[in-house]
Each structure stands twice: as structure tokens, then as C-alpha cells.
Image: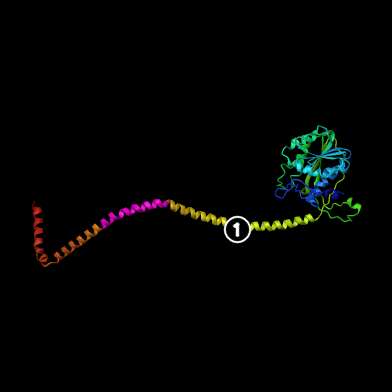
Amino acid sequence: MVGRVMRSDLGATRLSHAVEGVPERFVPAEMHGELVEAEHVARYLWASAFCSGRRVLDAGCGVGYGTRLLAQAGAAEVVGLDVADAVIEVARNEQTAGVEFEVGDLRSLSHPAGSFDLVVCFEVIEHVDEQDRVLDELARVLRPDGLLLISSPNRGHYVPGNPHHRHEYVPAELRAALERRFPAVRLISQHVMLASVIGDSREQQFDHPRTERLVEPGAEDELYTLAIAGAQLPAQPEPLVALTQFVELRRWLERFQDQERVLGEQSRALRELELLRGERREALDRLAEREQELAELPVLRERLAQAKATVPPLQEQIAALQASNAELARSVRVVHDMCNSVSWRITAPLRAGKRMVGRLRGRAA
């Protein structure tokens, strides 16, 4: 059974090479019972229908779980190839008849042209930059009547942001890339759907259940695109369903709730941050005003010094004016006293007659 094949013990070795919590490759010992296991194993079970009696290349084999499945399905020989030395070393720890593992680069395969009847390349092409070069190499090592089975995440519906992916094909792109190299191409969608299973899992018929489809698969469920390419395509095998544990859905719900809580905390933190930013802007405005005032301080000090310099002369002028005012006041008092004296009043007629004589003289002249 697939479950027993998948339970190879890899110890504590972390081969998935996770970045930001996203694994680069599927490792059965680390991800058993998860949806990712059903997705990966389903592809190899589907490919098993095409490998009987053939020499097969598993291009990008990882730890070799799929390579061994192909051998158990009746392949004459399977070569598992991966670029990571450590991964191939782990794959070699479990011996399987008719299986050989080697380190290699898909951009430059060491095998001569026409070496394989079947090439399998699942969830690998999106990890490399030189995708056309890889497709050319896969086509080169195939025999003229050989088949290529390949898959890619469907960029139109696959969750974005995988740090390990360089370019994910949409179905039309994958078809176009394959049609440039092969006379015939067929695309098959790999959907992710929820199932409810009734039956005794210990009975043999559990592995061949009756399937009732309650809804049509939605476009948003087409997370992966599989393709068959070659000179002539075989008949399409029956649809394949790979079941996994429901517990993963519960974990995702828990993660969703945790994520909602984290988002709520982040929202509150952002609001507080926005308030702090507003206070910071106000403080910066006040600081700019103070800096402007400080910049004007030397000019104000110079003006103050100039103003202080004018004070002594002004004080002298004020003192002189005050002295003049005092002298004028004394003169006014003298004149006032003189005008009010008895002698000034007695001589008033005489002064008047003198003024009249002066006017008469002026007229006579």
C-alpha cells in the first residue's frame, strides 16, 4: 500500500529545506498525512499506469518515494535524479530492485539522447530559471516514441508567494512550451476537493471505492496542471483520487483563527503606530519652528546690540532737552513775574506811546 511505502524513516534529517515555513520539496517522513502528501503521491500513482516494462527517468526525484512507486508499478528500470547530494544520499539508503539514484542537473543531463521510454518530472520545472533548457534536455533523452509526464502549479489559482518557485505555468503556457517540442500534448487538471468516505478501511474494496461527485470541480480547485507529451499519446487512464487525513483541515482552521488573532493585534498596533506618527509629525513641526527661531537668534542679538548702542546718545539728548525745558520754564516764570510787576503796569502807557511813534515814523518814511 502507498501508506506503507511512504513511511520510510528519515530520522531527524530536515530535507524539506523550508524557507519562511514553506518547504522546497516533499519529504514523506515530515509531511505524512498532510494534503501535500496526497497531491504528490497521486501524481506518481497516475504515472504508474504508463511505466510498465519501460525504462523511466524520474527527473527531480527528491528522496525517491515516487521513484520506488514507479518501480513497484512494473517499470523495467527507474533512474531517480536530483541536484541535491544530501537528498540522493538519503534516497540511496532504501534499496529497491530496479532503482538507481544519481546526482544530476536537469539543465545538462549526462544521459545520451534517446535513453528513456518515459520521463517523469513532477513539481520541478517551476524551481528552475532556465525552463526551456530543461524541457529541451527532457525531450532529448526521450526515445522517439517516448512519453513525457510533467506537472506545474497553476499560477492562476495556486497560492502565490512560494519563495522556491521561479515561474509557475498557467495551462496555456505549459501547452505552448510542450507543443514546441512534441507533436502531441494533453493537459490534465489536478483538483483539490474535500471527501467523505464510508467503509471499513481494513477491507480490500476500500482501495477501490465508488465515487459520487456532488459538485463539478471549480476552476479555483485546479491547483496543478499535469501534461502528457510525446509523438503519440496513450489512452487516458481512469481518474485517480488520493485521500489523506482530515486532521490537516482542522490544523488549517486553527491556523486561520490564530492568524485572525495576529491580524487583530497587528491592526491595533498599526492604529497605535499611526497615532504615534501623528504625534511625531506635530513634534517635528514644533521642532522646526524652534529651529527657525534659533536660526534667527543671531540677527535678533545684533539688532538688540544696535538698539543698545543708540540708548546713551538718546539719554544725552533727553537730558539736554530736560535742561532746556527747565531753563525755558525759568524764563517763562521771569517774564510772567515781570509782566505782573507794578513797574511793568505803570510803564505800560509809555510803551504803548513808543510803539505808536514808531508806526508814525514808518508811515512818514
Q: Position of residue 88 (x, y in %)?
A: 78, 42
- Name the element at disc 1: helix
Query: Which residue is nearer to you in this view: 336 or 41?
Result: 41
Q: Position of residue 365 (x, y in %)?
A: 8, 51
**Magenta stretch: helix, strand or loop mostly:** helix
Query: Magenta stretch containing residue 310, yes or no?
Result: yes
Residue 209 in view, yes or no? no
Q: Given the current orientation, which residue lies at the most extreme right position?
A: 204
Q: Position of residue 159 (x, y in %)?
A: 73, 48
Q: Which residues are magenta?
A: 296-318
Quarter-of-image position of residue 98: top right
What residue did someone put label 1 on? 272
Q: Image point 77% across, 43% down: which residue? A: 87
Quarter-of-image position of residue 125: top right
The crowding category of the residue bearing disc 1, from other C-alpha atoms within 10 Å (few below 14, some 14 to 19, many at least 20), is few
Quarter-of-image position of residue 74: top right
Q: Is residue 291 left or right of residue 75?
A: left
Q: Position of residue 57 (x, y in %)?
A: 82, 38
Q: Image point 22% across, 59% down: which residue? A: 323
Query: Magenta stretch containing residue 362, yes or no?
Result: no
Query: Which residue is nearer to you in this view: 80 or 156?
Result: 80
| In the image, residue 180 above or below residue 209 | above
